[in-house]
Image (cartoon, helix red, strand yellow):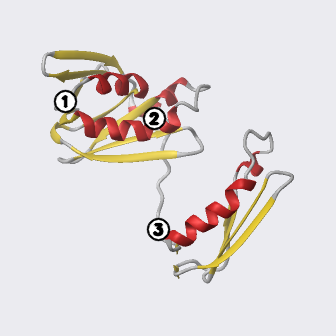
Amino acid sequence: MRIKCKAKDLVKKLQRVNSIIGKAKLYPVLSNVIFDVKNERSLTLYATDFELCIIENLNVNLEREGSIGVPCAKLTEILRELKDGEVFLEADEELNLELKWERAKYKLRGIDKSDYPKIPQVTLEEYVCVNKDIMKEILRKTMFAIATNDPRKALEGAYFKLTPSKIEVVAMDGSRLAHIEREVEEANISGEKSCI
């Protein structure tokens, strides 16, 4: 892989991806972010903590396709110190990532993409469209009742029940209960679907 991009754009994307990496201390492989370049203009960055997955895309100047996993926190720290400008990233077959910026040169040891957990592919065969203001209201009125750091993992989320005509959300933390129901704008689902 060999690419060129703006340092500040890459830092923004890495900071978003890094937001879930800090939570996954039990599995060192999850401290990495995967750089995947498959076409001529797009770099895909992704990371997971087994519960969430963040995928970011960035337009780059591509010289060679490829993929590598690199320590996200270390790379972000290096890039933050650089002033704005073009940064060159090159990964070799031995999984070393070389970063060049003006006269500075850094090397980071990476991992093979195949050593990283697979990211599930989401299809939009079935969907529900909810107005963003209604979704904000739903979240605002139920988030207070979602448990944090509870051994009962089901209480650390909200129950969503979707039908072709409405969305219903319930949250509880053992002592508080929140429930809200709203109409949906558009739906392409058959029957009733639910998730936590």
Q: Quadrant of residue 33?
A: top left
Residue for badge 3: 124
Q: Quadrant of the N terminus?
A: top left
Give the class, few, some or many, for how many residues have Cα within 10 Å of label 3's Cα (few <14, many ≥20). few
Q: Residue at x 32, y 40 (%)?
A: 36
Give the class, few, some or many, for how many residues have Cα within 10 Å of label 2's Cα (few <14, many ≥20). many
Left or right: residue 99 versus residue 169 is left
Residue for badge 1: 87
Amino acid type at mark 1? Val
Res 80 visible: yes
Q: Which mark is residue 18?
A: 2
Q: Earlier in the sequence, mark 3 or mark 2?
A: 2
**Where 179 sits versus 15, above or below?**
below
**Where 42 sits versus 92, above or below?**
below
Q: Earlier in the sequence, mark 3 or mark 1?
A: 1
- Mark 1, secondary structure of its residue: strand
Relative image position of residue 69 (x, y in whole percent):
38, 30
Q: Earlier in the sequence, mark 1 or mark 2?
A: 2
Residue 86 vs residue 162, the one in the foreground: 86
Relative image position of residue 180 (x, y in whole percent):
71, 71
Nearest to viewer (mark 3 / mark 1): 1
- Mark 3, secondary structure of its residue: loop
